[in-house]
Image: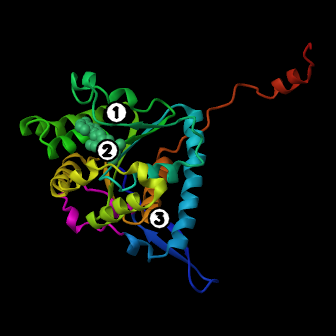
């Protein structure tokens, strides 16, 4: 089970004094079997960090270093697999989180799988058919940017399949994730939680900012009208599928610095728990130094 706490240093206003503040990642984890009420869940998260953005960014930089360093070992060892599932309402920042947290990580060994509306051949199969091939191989980290959860979220909000079908999917998903876990994949699932007012501001920003206009999709306005249906669908998905083997975390995402810090913290601590090791070198590696001393024919 991924229940851990970690601490990061906050530089107090009195510069000489380093204060140790503890943020418990368990605060964000959805306990298996518990109910979820998203209205009660903080979307700001600033209080967790005393509204101290400067220290938060310093801590983020440290987590990013941890992630880059451990990913290098994970790749070299070629043993463990890490799957990170990202889900969120439009504009909550799935893309921004990926670039902020994984910049500086060797792209070798890290992959992002995007799940858009299914194609016709995909619709001809069961909903997990298109998902399984994208799961991480040994030594890999894969980020699902949307995922099989859309099949109990957008599918439910839009009544794309009858309830008797989507209801069974929580069980399928738990079993599917258990299979991945049993075969050696660590799974972490992150729901980036924003307030609907934050979404409104960000959609307006997309209209107002020339570099962001390409992201504006009029369909998002229609989707927004279904906000309560989506929240209900998320609440059920989070409650039904947060398990010991594949826990959900609800990440406050109204502020990018908080969101990135919490996500990076969860991923860094998960990697530390996996604790990969560089493979043993070949036997008697020293002898090869001598062999290298001999010149090659040019
Ligand atoms: P975006 O991530 O904003 O580029 O949009 C991708 C779109 O694909 C979203 O509107 C999702 O709701 C949609 N989508 C992803 N997976 C599914 C699915 N299984 N069924 C229906 N729509 C989906
Ligand atoms: Mg979109």
Are the two marked residues, 1 and 2, in contact with CB atoms closer than 8 angstroms? yes
In the figure, 222 relative to 49: above or below? above
Residue 69 image offset from top left, x and y in percent: 60, 47
Is 43 covered by the magenta stretch? yes
Is 199 covered by the magenta stretch? no
Q: Secondary structure at mark 3?
A: helix
Residue 156 image offset from top left, x and y in percent: 15, 43
In-image side of 146 versus 22 (left or right): left
* Classed neighbour count for the residue bearing mark 2: other residues with Cα under 10 Å, few (<14), some (14–19), many (≥20): many
Q: Secondary structure at mark 2?
A: loop
Is label 3 or label 2 in front? 3
Q: How far separated are the C-alphas under marks 1 and 2?
A: 10 Å
In-image side of 271 versus 173 (left or right): right
Query: What residue did someone put label 3 on?
Result: 257
Are the two marked residues, 3 and 2, in contact with CB atoms closer than 8 angstroms? no
Residue range corresponding to the magenta coloring: 25-44
Residue 99 image offset from top left, x and y in percent: 50, 49
Q: Residue furthest top?
A: 297
- Res 200 → quadrant: bottom left
Q: Locate the C terminus and report the quarter of the image it occupies.
A: top right
Query: What residue did someone put label 1 on?
Result: 180
Q: Earlier in the sequence, mark 1 or mark 2?
A: 1
Q: How far separated are the C-alphas under marks 1 and 3?
A: 31 Å
* Classed neighbour count for the residue bearing mark 1: other residues with Cα under 10 Å, few (<14), some (14–19), many (≥20): many
Between 210 and 177, the one lying in front of the other is: 210
Query: What residue did someone put label 2 on?
Result: 246
In-image side of 155 versus 65 (left or right): left
Q: Is residue 298 visible?
A: yes
Main SS category, magenta section = loop
Q: How many marks?
A: 3
- Residue drawn at (31%, 61%) of the image: 199
Q: Secondary structure at mark 1?
A: helix
């Amino acid at each position: 089970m991924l229940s851990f706490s970690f601490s990061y240093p906050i530089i107090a206003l009195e510069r000489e004094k380093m204060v140790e503040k503890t943020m418990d990642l368990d605060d964000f984890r959805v306990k298996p079997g518990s109910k979820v009420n998203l209205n009660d869940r903080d979307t700001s998260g600033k209080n967790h960090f005393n509204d101290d953005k400067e220290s938060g960014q310093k801590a983020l930089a440290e987590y990013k270093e941890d992630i880059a360093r451990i990913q290098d070992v994970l790749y070299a060892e070629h043993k463990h697999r890490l799957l990170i599932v990202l889900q969120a309402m439009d504009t909550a920042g799935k893309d921004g989180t990926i670039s902020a947290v994984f910049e500086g990580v060797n792209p070798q060994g890290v992959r992002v799988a995007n799940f858009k509306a299914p194609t016709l051949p995909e619709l001809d199969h069961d909903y997990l058919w298109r998902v399984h091939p994208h799961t991480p191989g040994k030594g890999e980290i894969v980020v699902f940017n949307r995922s099989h959860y859309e099949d109990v979220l957008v599918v439910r909000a839009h009544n794309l399949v009858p309830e008797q079908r989507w209801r069974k999917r929580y069980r399928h998903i738990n079993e599917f994730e258990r299979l991945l876990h049993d075969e050696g994949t660590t799974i972490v699932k992150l729901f980036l939680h924003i307030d609907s007012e934050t979404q409104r501001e960000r959609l307006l920003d997309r209209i107002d900012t020339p570099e962001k206009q390409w992201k504006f999709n009029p369909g998002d306005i229609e989707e927004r009208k279904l906000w309560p249906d989506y929240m209900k669908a998320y609440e059920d998905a989070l409650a039904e599928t947060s398990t010991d083997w594949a826990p959900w975390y609800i990440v406050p995402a109204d502020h990018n610095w908080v969101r990135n810090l919490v996500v990076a913290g969860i991923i860094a601590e998960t990697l530390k728990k996996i604790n990969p090791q560089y493979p043993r070198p070949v036997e008697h590696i020293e002898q090869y130094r001598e062999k290298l001393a001999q010149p090659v024919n040019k």
